[in-house]
Amino acid sequence: MKQPYRILILGLLFMVPLVSCDTDELVQLNVNPTAANDLDWKFIFTTGQVWTAENRYVNGRVHLNLAGGLIQQMATMQIGGERGAGDKYYRHLDSFNAYMDRVYETALKPLAEVIRQTGPDGLNPTWTNLHHMAQVAYILPMHIMTDLYGNVPYSEANRGVEQLFFPVFDNQESIYKDMLAKLQTAAGAIGTGPDEVGSADIYYDGDFSKWKKLANSLMLRLAMRISNVDPGTAQQFVQSAISGGVMTSNDDLCRVPMAAGPSQWFNQNGLSRAMIPDDWGANNMLSKTLVDWLQENNDPRLRIWSVRGVWGGPYLTDAADQIGMPNGFDTETLREWVLEQTGVDKPVERELDFSRLNPLLLDVDDPFILMTHAEVEFLLAEAAVKGWHSGDAAQHYANGVRSAMQQWTMFDESFEVTDEEVDAYLAANPFDGSEEMIGQQHWASNFMQWYEAYSNWRRTGYPTLSPVNYPGNVSGGTIFRRIEYNTVEAATNPNLQSGGTLPDDVKTRMWWDVN
C-alpha cells in the first residue's frame, strides 16, 4: 500500500468515534467558557446610569464651555476653540457635535436596550420596576438632548438592531408630551413589580420611593418647561407631579456617584477632569455676573464656590477678595478693563486677578448632580404664583434657598451652611412674590448644572443677562437659543431637512422657547 493511502485510511479510522459521538458534546466544544451567555439588564442599567454623567469630552465642551458660559456663571479670556464658544458666541463644531455624537451612544443606547428587554416583547417582561426606572433614567439625558438642539431623533432613536439607521427627527412638542406621559406612568408603576434592583441602582440603591419622587420631580421640571407655550398641558402635569409626590429634602436629590478608578473615562467626574489644569485644563473662571450677584446679596455660597489664586494655593477665600471675570473679553481687552477698574496698567494674571471654582468641588470622585430638591422647591414656588398649586409660594421659596445653600456638604464637610445663616439671608432678602426673584434663585441653584440653568433661563428670562458682542461671533451679539446639529448627522441623515429645527443656526428658537 502506498504511503498516501495509508495516511488516508488511518485518518478515516480516527474519525469514526467523532461521527458516532453525542451531538451535544460537539456543541459544547464551541462554547466559550469565558463569555456571557445571558446579558444582565441590571448591569447594563448601571452602565447607562453612569453615562448620564457623561465624561470629560462632553462636560468640557458642552456643559462647561457652552452652557456655563452662555448662562454667565463661568467666563474665559480665551478666544478660539471650545473654551471660548459659550463666552464669546463662537461656532465650535466639536462643542456643537459632542452631546449628540456621544450621549446617544453612551447613555441612551444601553438604557434603551434595558427598556426594550424589560418591556412586553422583551426577554424579561416581568421586570417592571427596572423597566420604568430605565425610562426615567433615559429621559434625564434625552430631555437635555432636545433642549440643546430642538427637534431630534426620538421615536426611532437607538433602533439600529431593527435596521433603522436614519431615524426621523421628531418635533419637540411630541417629544415632550411623550416624555411627560412616560414619567407619569413610571411614577405610578415603580415599586409595583416583583423585581428588585438593589445595588445595581447607583442613584438610590434600589429605593423605589425615591425613584417615584424623581419621576414626579422630573415631570414637574418638564411641565414647567412648556408652561409658556402650552399652559394647559403644563398645568395638568404639574398638578399630577405634585399629587404623586416630589422631592422633599436634599436626601432625595439625584446624583451620580463617581470614583477615582478604574477608568478615567467612565468612573471619574468628567466636569472635574475638564477643569483640572494638568488634565483637560479648561481656563474658565467664575463670571463677574455670578460673583457680583452673590456679593450683593451677601450669599454664603460664595465662600463655597469661589477662591482666588493659582491652582494648589494659597487661596484668597474671603468674599470681599473674590473678583469675577467679565464675559466676552480677551487678554488685551481684559487688561483695559482692569485698568479702568483699578487704575493699574499691567498684564492680566488670570489666576491671581480673578476667582476660580473651588478645587474642593473638583475631586475626580465627587458626585455629578442631575436634579436637586432646591430646583423642585423653586418650581413649586413658581407654580403657586401661577395659581397652579395651592402651596405657599413664600415657603417653597424659602425651602429652595435653604436646600440650595445646604446641599454642598456632599462635596466637602467644610461647606456647611447653618440654619441660622440661611435664616439671616432670607431675612435680608425677603421674597417679594415675583417670578423674577424665584428665577434669580433658580439660576443660582443650578450652579454646576449648567444645562438646566441654560434651559430655564431661556424659558423664564431670569436673571436679566447682558449679552456680549465679541468680534466674529456667530449670533450677532445675542445669547444662543440652541446649538447646531452634529455635522455627521446633518450630512448623512436625510430626515434632518424634513424634520429638524431649521434654520440650523444658534438663533433659531425651539418649540417651548417663546419668552
Image (spheres, grey):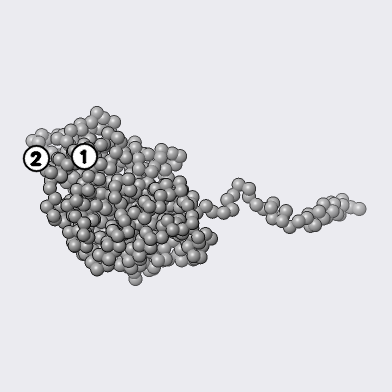
The answer to whether 93 appears left or right of 31 in the picture is left
Depth check, front residue: 16 or 46 = 46
Residue that badge 1 annotates: 419
Depth check, front residue: 81 or 221 = 221
The answer to whether 490 appears left or right of 283 in the picture is right
Location of the C terminus by quadrant is bottom left
- Outermost residue on the bottom side: it is 498
Q: What kind of residue is marked 2?
A: Glu
- The secondary structure type at the circle numbered 2 is helix
Sequence-earlier tag: 2 or 1: 2
The answer to whether 119 appears left or right of 146 in the picture is right
- Residue 457 is drawn in which quadrant? bottom left
Q: What kind of residue is marked 1?
A: Asp
Above or below residue 106? Residue 367 is above
* Rendered image: mark on residue 340: 2
Q: What is the x, y in percent for residue 85?
A: 26, 50
- The secondary structure type at the circle numbered 1 is helix
- Residue 354 is drawn in which quadrant? top left
Q: What is the x, y in percent for residue 48?
A: 43, 52
What crowding class fits label 2: few (fewer than 14 Cα within 10 Å), some (14-19), or many (20 or more)?
few
Please tell me which residue is depicted at 27% across the width and 62% down the height of the picture: 239
